[in-house]
């Protein structure tokens, strides 16, 4: 039970970091030209994103709220099935990161009507992003590496309703 509570404390802490960074961006960057951290390479530049990644699906906030809630329910169902051995710690970390990223941006959508973005790689003209986006991106890269190089197929049997031997996988 302590481990269950601990993961949610981590998620709240990560969300707090994201939200504090956005509050800073709102107060320091909104209405300015931004800050060139490394001129012509990396800037802190305020943007109100009313869509998804790369600005797609502009002004569909209800859609994003519903998708986020549905994804959170599914991911929590998966998380609760993750076995306890230490080799599954990376999956628990992935859960914390992706939930923090999803809820960090959800908070923006619900309370502001848009997501605050402010990191901009000008050199490659990469879309402006935020801390929550970093959480989600790192999670996806981590999961790809774990699935391709670390876990074997049988390590992920817990995702089935019943495990390899027909028994419930919840430990």
Image (spheres, rainbow, N blue to C red):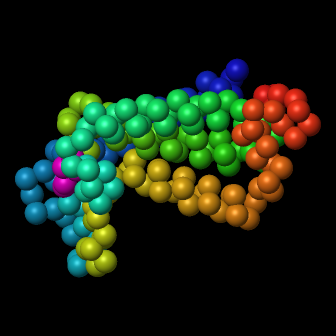
Q: Magenta segment range?
A: 46-50
Residue 44 in percent (x, y) is at 24, 61
Name which residue lies at 92% across and 37% down. 165
Q: Is residue 15 magenta?
A: no
Q: Position of residue 82 (x, y in %)?
A: 72, 37
Snapshot quadrant of residue 63: top left
Where in the figure is residue 154, as x and y percent of width and height?
83, 49
Q: What secondary structure characterizes most of the magenta part?
A: strand
How many marks the image carries: the answer is 0
Q: Quadrant of residue 101?
A: top left
Looking at the image, the residue that sits furthest to the left is 31
Instruction: Work out whether residue 166 or residue 136 is closer to the camera in this orientation and state it.
Output: 166
Instruction: Identify the image quadrant of the N terminus.
Output: top right
Which of 44/102 is in front? Answer: 102
Q: Is residue 24 visible?
A: no
At x 28%, y 33%, the residue is: 62
Q: Is residue 54 visible?
A: yes
User: In this rendering, would 55 be left or right of 12?
Assistant: left
- Residue furthest toward the right? 165
Residue placed furthest toward the top:
1
Name the residue located 71 percent from the left edge and 44 percent from the top edge.
89
Of residues 133 and 7, the one nearer the viewer is 133
Residue depicted at x 37% and y 32%:
66
What is the quadrant of residue 32 in the picture?
A: bottom left
Q: Residue 171 in the image: x percent, y percent?
A: 81, 28
């Amino acid at each position: 039970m302590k481990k269950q509570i601990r993961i949610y404390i981590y998620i709240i802490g990560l969300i707090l970091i994201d939200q504090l960074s956005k509050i800073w961006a709102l107060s320091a960057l909104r209405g300015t030209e931004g800050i060139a951290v490394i001129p012509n390479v990396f800037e802190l530049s305020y943007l109100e994103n009313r869509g998804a990644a790369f600005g797609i699906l502009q002004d569909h906030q209800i859609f994003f709220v519903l998708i986020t809630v549905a994804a959170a329910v599914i991911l929590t169902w998966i998380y609760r099935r993750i076995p306890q051995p230490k080799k599954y710690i990376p999956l628990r970390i992935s859960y914390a990161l992706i939930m923090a990223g999803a809820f960090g941006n959800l908070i923006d959508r619900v309370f502001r009507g848009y997501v605050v973005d402010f990191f901009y790689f000008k050199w490659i003209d990469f879309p402006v992003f935020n801390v929550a986006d970093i959480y989600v991106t790192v999670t996806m890269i981590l999961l790809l590496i774990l699935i391709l190089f670390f876990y074997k197929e049988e390590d992920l049997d817990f995702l089935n309703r019943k495990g390899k031997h027909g028994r419930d996988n919840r430990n």
